[in-house]
Amino acid sequence: MINKIKNIVEKLSEQEAKSLLLQHLYRIQLLEETKYPEDKFLEDLKKEYHDLLQFASKPGQTNYNTIHIVFGDSPAGSLKIALPRDEKVIRFSDQFSIGPVHQLHTERGLELRKKWLYLHINLDEQSTLTYLEDFQQTLTEISNIPEHIPIYIWTANNAHEQTSARLVVHALKNRKNTIRLINVYTSYQNHWPTPPEEFFPRNTGEVSAENLKIIYAANKNDQPLTEHTRNKLADEWEKLAETTEVLRIWEDDQIKSVSESYFDAFIIEKARYLHNEQTKPDFMKSARLIGEVIGHLNQYTGDQFIEYRVRQLILQGIFEIEGVPKAMRFYSVKMKEDINSTKRE
């Protein structure tokens, strides 16, 4: 059995392996920070193990009868495990709550977005080199879906997936495919009601493959989007594509464009909180601060944008730095003494 498991792991794609690791880390965080029971934790891990064995035993599939569009490597990996092999997953790996989306459905808009990400976000070299090709290839893959195949678009209550969904609906504006939106936040609350202070999925990537399977079964036969709703979502994309802001949030059930400094005060608040836990305010790994911010933020932006804002706060003289900010693990930060003491008075 050990050799079988090794073979399965070796055959996983990088995205699928990352997805499994992320699910495990989310569960450990839930175990430590919420009322997530230990027996449920163990039960979920065992279920994931058996799902993976079953997934690996299925033969490959080239003819698909259903297409699922999802936004992110982690949810794509989980969804591949949750779905039958005759249903295909197309993923966008981008983070659409950040960066410019001005005229993104045009070549010029895509070039501008790539340039902004290159200048502001610590992307790995491979992602930068293949960004335009990967983005256009995904759009081409979507546009080549045969019109008789139904499409499911997976979203949650966050600006990233809601912006992405509108882009995709706009790309499919003149197609005859039936389109259904599955909101994992809404469906999760219907199946597993939780108080706001306990776990709720901010994005599809936070939901296990097992629960995605349950959510899909519950929503599979929902009515597809009407022509009116499809046109409305496509129109909303065109309005978004006229904006010039580089940060979007989800508020009052709609996407709102805000200043890129929108989260700065919250980052400073969390830095002060972490300093208060120290005997004396001292340098802390930037990854520690970013993790604290991400863990308590009610929006989904990804850690790369928060890391960008930490670097901006360094440039503004709010934080001191120790190390080289080529990636968050390489440097530490602390609030400047005069700023920190002034705020404490």
Image (cartoon, rainbow, N blue to C red):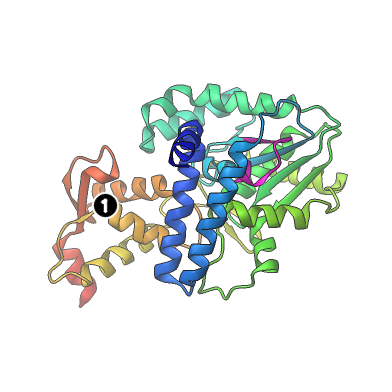
Asked whether residue 243 appears in the rendered view, the answer is: no
Give the farthest residue toward the bottom.
Answer: 345
Q: 10 Å neighbourhood of mark 1: few (<14), some, or many (≥20)?
A: many
Residue 51 visible in the current orientation: yes
Q: Residue at x 32, y 65 (%)?
A: 270
| Amino acid carrying mark 1 in the image | Ser
Instruction: Estimate the x, y position of residue 64 in percent, counting from the top left.
Output: 76, 31
Residue placed under numbered mark 1 in the picture? 286
x then y, percent, for residue 152: 74, 43
Depth check: 275 or 44 in front?
44
Q: Classify residue 242 by image quadrant.
A: top right
Which quarter of the rendered picture does the C terminus lie within?
Answer: bottom left
Q: Is residue 322 left or right of residue 114?
A: left
Per the rendered image, the range of residues in magenta is 78-90
Seen in the image, is 207 located left or right of residue 343?
A: right
Q: Residue at x 35, y 61 (%)?
A: 292
Residue drawn at (36%, 62%) of the image: 265
**In the picture shown, does residue 130 fall above or below 198?**
above
Tell whether 312 sits left or right of 1. left
When the figure is inspected, residue 336 is found, relative to residue 280, above or below; the finding is: above
Whether residue 272 sits left or right of residue 9 in the image: it is: left
Using the image as rendered, state which of residue 69 and residue 8 is in the foreground. 8
